[in-house]
Every structure is written in C-alpha cells, then in structure tokens.
Amino acid sequence: MGHHVVVPAPPLDALVSRLWDWDMPQAGHHYERVLPVPGAALIINLHENETRVYSDDGLRRCTRAAASVIGGPCLRSQIIDTAEQVRVMGVVFRPGGAHAFTGEHHEVLVTQDIGLEDLFGSSAHQLRERLLNTPSAQVRLDVLEQWLLAHMRMPQLAPEVLYALGEIGRQPQVARIGALVRDTGLSEYRFGRLFRRQVGMGTKRYARLMRFRGVVDAVYRCAAVDWSGVAVDGGYGDQAHLVHEFREFAGMTPTAFMAARGPYLNHLPLE
C-alpha cells in the first residue's frame, strides 16, 4: 500500500509528466476539492467500476463516468468522492500531451471525460483487467507505462503551440499574448484556434492558470503569507486581482485555501 509516482522514460516523457499509483485506506473526509492543472489526466479506478465528480454549486450534483476515463485539463477546481479513491492509478499529461496521444480535439476533453474504452476499445478493457490482477504497485506502473508506449502515436504539436507553451511556462506572470502571437507569424484567429485544439483552452486562460499555479506552488508550505507581495511577484495588478483569480480557479479565497491545505498539494479536504 502507499502512494507511488514515477516519471516515464523517453520517448513517453514528451507527452506524460508522471504516472502515479494510489493504494490507501479511505480518507476520513467524504469529499476533496482538486485544483486545476494545465494538463489532461487519465484516471483508472481499481476499487470501483466508475468514477464520480460533483458540482461545486452547493448542490453536489454527481456526474458518473466509466472506471477508466481521460479528460481535462479542468478550467477550475472540481470535487471528487474519496470513497472511490482507495485503489486508483493515473497519468498526468503535459499540456497538449493528451491531444497528441489520443488525436481528440482537446476542447472535447475539457468539456467531458471520455471512457478509455471508447478511445482504445478492448485493449483498454484488457489493461484494466490486468491492473486489477497485479498486486505490486511498481509492476502496475510498469504495465501502464508499457501500454501507453505501445499506443502512443507521438504526433508533434504544432511548432507555434510549442513556442507559446515554452514562453508562457518560463514567465507566466509577464506573458504578453499579443506579442507572442505575432512572433508565431500566424493570425490571431488561426493561432487561437490551433492552441485551443491542442491545449484545450485559449492562451490567455492558459497564462492565467499558470500564474495561479505559480502562486499555489510558492505559498503551499508557508506558515504565513504576505499576500500583497505575492500578488506583485505573481504578476497580478493588486491583491483583489489575486483573490478574484483564486475564486475562479480554486473556488475559494487565498486565505481559505491556506486553511484547507492538506498533505497533498492539489487535494483540499472538504468534509
């Protein structure tokens, strides 16, 4: 039992940042808020035959999907059910990686999770069956990595998209989208359409998400935070701007985020 994370070997590492295996007793709280990340994810539930997410509107409406699903990136936080998070595996794709792997229009993956069997048929079913019957976490991770490697087609992201991802990733707090688009040589319309297809969101939203992620990474382990200073360093106009972005992406204020922190960066216990 435990939580294991591995970085895949080349060439898979060009599309996937990490693979993980979670085999732990059920948490003492029922729900968790999961923060958005810039890449899509593959989830394989080995404890139940479905995955569940809940609306973040106070009603907790449940959306059920297959046991193995691929989707995202999420544009804001989502709520999950810890009852199913007992034995589960996952893949975290790099930005654009899921589009390259599946060939799906990335905006489709943003709007809804897609069953892995709908994309890969019986091969995906056989993968989950094999994982269900593999007791070792390390062997499960090896099996999953080899399956991904066997199914990857490794199409290249457009060079204009790769350039934009690199520029925004280096300095999201000062990214100038207009100048970046001009550098690619494409019209704003053509570039925007291409970026959304391959990454799942527009460049401005991507830069906003990366700025938010930079702040989360910077403050997560801090005992006390100067939010005015964090706002300036993070590229926000003022502290009110930072609060607005936290509400947009995390569904809560920065202060509430700090109070809700748990042992895992992207998972906030709710109740």
Image (tube, grey):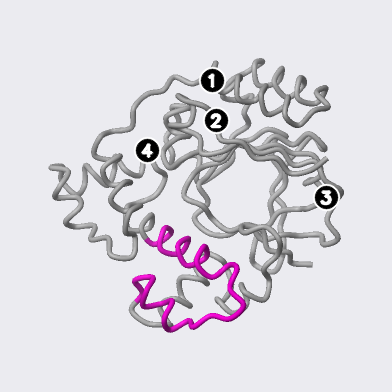
In which quadrant of the rendered view does residue 158 lie?
top left
How far across and down, in percent of the image, does residue 57 sit? 64, 67
First-in-chain label (2 vs 3): 2
Tell me which numbered mark, 4 or 3, is placed earlier along the sequence: 3
Provide the residue span drawn in magenta.
208-236
Per the image, is 251 magenta? no
- Using the numbered discs, state the Cα–Cα distance from disc 2 to disc 1 in whole angstroms: 9 Å
- From the viewer's perspective, is residue 249 above or below residue 141? below
Residue designated by label 2: 8
Q: Earlier in the sequence, mark 4 or mark 2?
A: 2
Q: Position of residue 140 (x, y in %)?
A: 72, 27
**Which numbered disc, 1 or 4, marks the residue that appears first in the sequence?**
1
Residue 248 in the figure: left or right of residue 161: right
Q: x and y percent of residue 35 in the render?
A: 58, 58
Q: Nearer the viewer, mark 2 or mark 3?
A: 2
What is the quadrant of the N terminus in the image? top right
Under mark 2, the amino acid is: Pro
User: For the point 15% across and 47% down, which residue is it?
Assistant: 183
Which disc, if any, is residue 83?
3
Q: Which of 244/52 is in front?
A: 244
Q: Secondary structure at mark 1?
A: helix
Q: Earlier in the sequence, mark 2 or mark 1?
A: 2
Q: Is residue 10 above or below residue 247?
A: above
Nearer to us: label 2 or label 1: 2
- Marks 4 and 2 sit apart, C-alpha to C-alpha, by 21 Å
Q: Residues within 10 Å of mark 3 (few under 14, many from 20)?
A: some
Which residue sits at x=48%, y=81%?
Answer: 227
